[in-house]
Every structure is written in C-alpha cells, then in structure tokens.
Amino acid sequence: MFRVKTSVISILLIAGLLLLAGCGANNKENASPNAGSSNGETPAAVDAGTSSQVKTIKHVWGETTIKGTPIKIVALDYAFIDMLSVLDIKPIATVGIGESGFPDYLKDQVNGEGITNVGQAKQPNLEVLKSVKPDLILANPDRHEMIKDQLSDIAPTIAFDDNNYEMVLANLGLLADVVGKKEQGDKVIQTIEAKIKEGKEKMKTAPSALVVGAFEDDSTVWLKSSFVGSLLSGIGVNYLFDGSKDNTAAESKTDIAKLSLERLGEYNPEYLFLYGEPEKWLNNPIYKNLQAVKENKAITVSRDLWSKGRGPRAAELIIDQALKTMAGGNNNIPRR
C-alpha cells in the first residue's frame, strides 16, 4: 500500500512540473516584441534612435561624421545664427565681426543672453570655444580655413559657403536634416522659393538696380553673383554690376567691388538701394542727375540687413522690401 501511494505522488509531481514548463514556454512565445530586443535596447532608445544615429555630411571642407542629434551648436558667422533662428535653435556660442554686435534684424529673433562670445569671426578664441563643449561647429570656409583642423579637433565641424541665396537654401536644408528638423527647414525653403516666384510674376518689367555702400573713403557695390545680387536677380531685377570682386574693398565679405560716384553715373540704374553715408552725395551734381535720384527711387536701406544679412530670414526681408519698392510703388522701406 505504501509503495502504491508513493508511486501516485511521484506521477503527480512529474505531471505538475511538465505543466509548469509548458506554461513558461507559452509565455515566452506569446511575449510582445516591444518588451525588449536582442541587442538589449529599451523601447524608448529604439524609438528615439538619436543616440545611435550616425550621419556623414558632405560640405566645402570634405566630409564630417556626426553621431546623434547635435544640440550644443557654435555659430562662427551671423549667417549661421540666421539659419538656426528659423529652426528655433539658439546657438551656445557665436562671434563678433568688427565692432558690431548682432545685426538688428536678428536681435528680435536671437536673444544674446546666455550665448558665449568666442571672440572675432576671423580669429575665434579656441580655448573659450573648447570650454563650451559643443556638439557641432558651423564655420565659414574663407574666414576659418587656417584653423579648420583645430576646430575639427574640438567638435564635428561643417563649413558652409553663403555666396548666393541658392547656396543658403541648400545649406539650410542640410543643417535642418542634421539637427532633426528637416520638415521645418523644408517649409522655410518652400516659403522663400514661393516668394521669389511670386516676385517674378509681380515684376512687370525688369527694372535695373544696384546695391551700393556709400562711405567717406571708398564706396562699394555688391556683385550680381552675391547673396543680395542673386536675390534681386531671382525676383526679376536686371542687376547691373556683373564685374569681378575686389579683395581690397572695405567690407567683411569679398563679393563686392569699389565703385566711384562717377562710375555709378555710368551705370545709372533705375533703382538704387543705398546704405552707409549716402547723404555725403546729396549736393553732388553727378548724384543729383542719377535717374534713380530724380525719380525718387534712391532708397536708403539697413546696412545690417542688406550688407550683413546672409540667411533665410534675411532673404525673406530683402525680397519683401524690394518688392514693396519695385512692384508695389512704395519707396518707404523701413531701416530695420
């Protein structure tokens, strides 16, 4: 009798163990694939994807590998502050150019508080730049050519050229992709391209124009291939100065040339967009005899915008102001 009871108990125990093993196997088979992964990543890390994201970016200086999404970005030119601002990004550090601060048109968009100044654009302080521990540095290929290796040692560095508006829009698209805001960048690009197309349609003729900096020592004119020259050409303006750039001209960029008042008289454009000190010409017979002056189409504009502006926000403002004057019949451009 004892042996019979023992056998029954043993059979029951074995059956129970087999049942438990079967349940465990079923639980594993029915487990949700989101509960974990073979590489040990959590669902949040898999969904976010930013920590493991690697992109290789082609730019003026070659290729740069960027891991993850950059957050701490250094802008070594005002044009990059402009680009970042339309993506709702505030740089952690930037530079000055000469004695000037942020251009007026950017002050309402980018608050300077909390942004580290790393010196002058031509010669940024590399130690200060290193101290802010950036994830990404945006550099100008002309100004920063001599220090590109040092910049790359501090953080991944991308060099953007901004000679014309097409380059600026292409740069914006690339940057937006790098910082995870491609859709937002595309919308800005589409808006500017639509403004240019609309401007061309509104411009019934192709009025001639020049953008001139009037100064006591040397006066300058922007080239047709420059940022502002390409914008005006894009909306259907006959931009007259198609000459070569002059590296001795007194502006921070090189896509300009010196232009005397006598030479300006030879071009004699229908519209003149002037900044600097145009009042010095008011009593000059050559100036008074210009077509644009006689027809009240010599317009004083902001140097900060029309000379220093190089980004998508500057592009929109310049287009709006130019069309207001040339296609809307209103010559009262605000000096922003």
Image: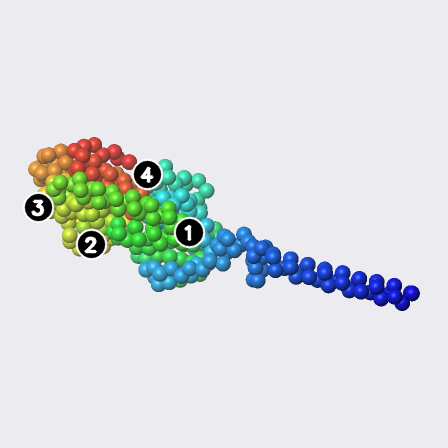
Label whose residue precedes the other's in the sequence (2 or 4): 4
Marks 2 and 3 sit apart, C-alpha to C-alpha, by 19 Å
Marks 4 and 1 sit apart, C-alpha to C-alpha, by 26 Å
Mark 3 and mark 1 in contact? Answer it, CB < 8 Å.
no
Marks 2 and 4 sit apart, C-alpha to C-alpha, by 26 Å
Label whose residue precedes the other's in the sequence (2 or 3): 2
Q: Which label sits in the foreground, 3 or 1?
A: 1
Identify which amino acid the numbered label 1 is placed on: Val
Identify which amino acid the numbered label 4 is placed on: Asp
**Residue labelled with disc 3:** 266
Q: Is residue 175 visible?
A: yes
**Residue labelled with disc 2:** 245
Q: What's the mark number on residue 1?
A: none
Mark 3 and mark 4 in contact? Answer it, CB < 8 Å.
no
Q: What secondary structure is marked by label 3?
A: helix
Identified at 84% across, 64% down, the residue is: 8
Q: What's the mark number on residue 179?
A: 1
Label whose residue precedes the other's in the sequence (3 or 1): 1
Marks 3 and 1 sit apart, C-alpha to C-alpha, by 48 Å
Q: What secondary structure is marked by label 4?
A: helix
Identify which amino acid the numbered label 2 is placed on: Lys
